[in-house]
Amino acid sequence: MRQYLCFLFLLVNKLLRRPKKQADKNAVLVIQTAKMGDAVLSLYFIETLKNRYQKVYVLSSAPNREIYEMSSAVTEFFEYKPNEKSPSEMTRTWEKVKAAAGEPSDVVVLQPSFPAMFIALRFTSARSHLLMFYEAGFSSRLFSLLFDDVAVDYGKKKTVEYYLDFTCISEKGDMKNYDSVRPGIKPVSGLTSVESEPGVFSIGLSIKTANPMKELPAESFAAFIRLLKNSYHDKPFALYLFGSEAEYAENEAFIKTYLQDVTVKNLCGKAALSQIPALMAKLDAFVSVDTALSYMADIAGIPVLNIAGPCDAGRQSPLGKNVVVITSSLSCAPCFTTGRSTYQCRRGDQACLREITPETIFRKFIQLIQSSR
């Protein structure tokens, strides 16, 4: 009921209220309320925006702050709190952004959540743009009627390509040439966690995700690492595990359980999120389940092997040229998309990941390395 009352308020506000001040034609506000992987991918879109706008503001959740602040295209970041969903709380967020950024000429919502749409529509002087997923529910579709410009993600191409359907992008360009809009990352110094030595082949790994349904069985990942060790038995190589500080203990347990005779450096939580791409740039390759870290490795410009499993790689996956994605052949996959997050396997056995053998991962890894030379 509260959402429908808000809809009526915004409708009346849109029809009757006159803008109190002229919008800043050189400013755009991007609202992204999704998780880290989506935030990393949105950096490509933000890179295109800086060609038209002098100021690119971003409103997103606290975990995404470092992701956006590492981009040289972002002027200022504002924090959105997902648990604040009452009209008064959302209005305070809008007032905070407006006080600092003024009235941008365009407001772009990349995730059709109720708070994001409400805040965007409070900017009455701005043209409002919304990315709508075809899986969206009734309330999201209802609020979309209040937006000036709606791009619908029908799942026929990459979600980031639908961003170019927004009318605020004056030149459509070719979003498939992702290297031309690779996000500019601010340089960082003092990174010593990865030793970039001549002749040493350095491989980054990520085995954990915020959603366990996307994780490859630990024994499969360990078997793949052993295949790597056997392949490089006469050559110097180094392995590095990446992840959050909260995942450090789990990765340590993984090493002690499966890899006691393999030298692996656990870097979980050892670097700030904003430093990760610069750290990864020292690697020769990165192997990961579908997580934000695989997208960061792609931004760093290194070869990436992404194990998609239940995820819809057709809509969301690393975008660079040196990327290999392993998908499932099961009829029930993919069940996890940008428009529909799943946290429990309908079959109950995560067969889409269990069918991906260590030998398959190793074979795809060799193909990746050979094709990227």
Image (cartoon, helix red, strand yellow):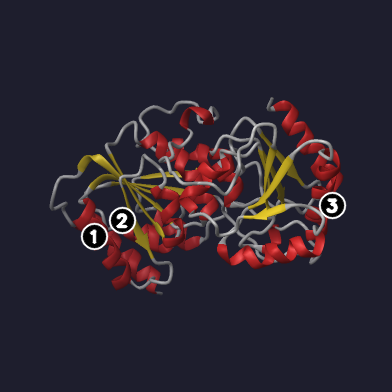
Q: Which residue is mark 2?
A: 121
* Amino acid type, residue under disc 3 in the picture: Ala
Query: Could you say where residue 259 lies in the image, as x and y percent from the top left?
Result: 80, 57
Disc 3 residue crowd, few under 14, some 14–19, many 20+, Cα 10 Å: some
Q: Is residue 372 left or right of residue 356?
A: left
Circle 3 — which element? helix
Residue 135 in view of the camera: yes
Q: What residue is drawn where x is 80% and y is 65%?
A: 257
Name the spot of residue 107 as percent of width and height, x first: 32, 48
How far apart marks 2 and 3 lie (CA) works out to 51 Å
Mark 3, residue position: 223
- Indicate the position of residue 261 as horizontal and vertical percent values: 82, 55
Q: CA distance from mark 1 to mark 2?
A: 9 Å
Vertical position of residue 302 compared to residue 338: above or below: above
Amino acid type shown at disc 2: Leu
> What residue is rendered at 75% in x and 56% in y?
216
First-in-chain label (1 vs 2): 1
Task: Name the side, left or right, on which 370 lies relative to 243.
Answer: right
10 Å neighbourhood of mark 2: few (<14), some, or many (≥20)? many
Position of residue 240 relative to residue 55, above or below, is below
Q: Secondary structure at mark 1?
A: helix
Quadrant placement of the N terminus: bottom left
The local secondary structure at tag 2 comes to helix
Say whether residue 97 is left or right of residue 358.
left
Task: Give percent across and percent down for residue 63.
Answer: 46, 60
Q: CA distance from mark 1 to mark 3?
A: 60 Å
Name the amino acid type tagged 1. Answer: Asn
**Quarter of the image containing the C terminus?**
top right
**Dots 1, 2 in contact, CB < 8 A:** yes
Up-down relation of residue 5 to residue 286 (above or below) = below
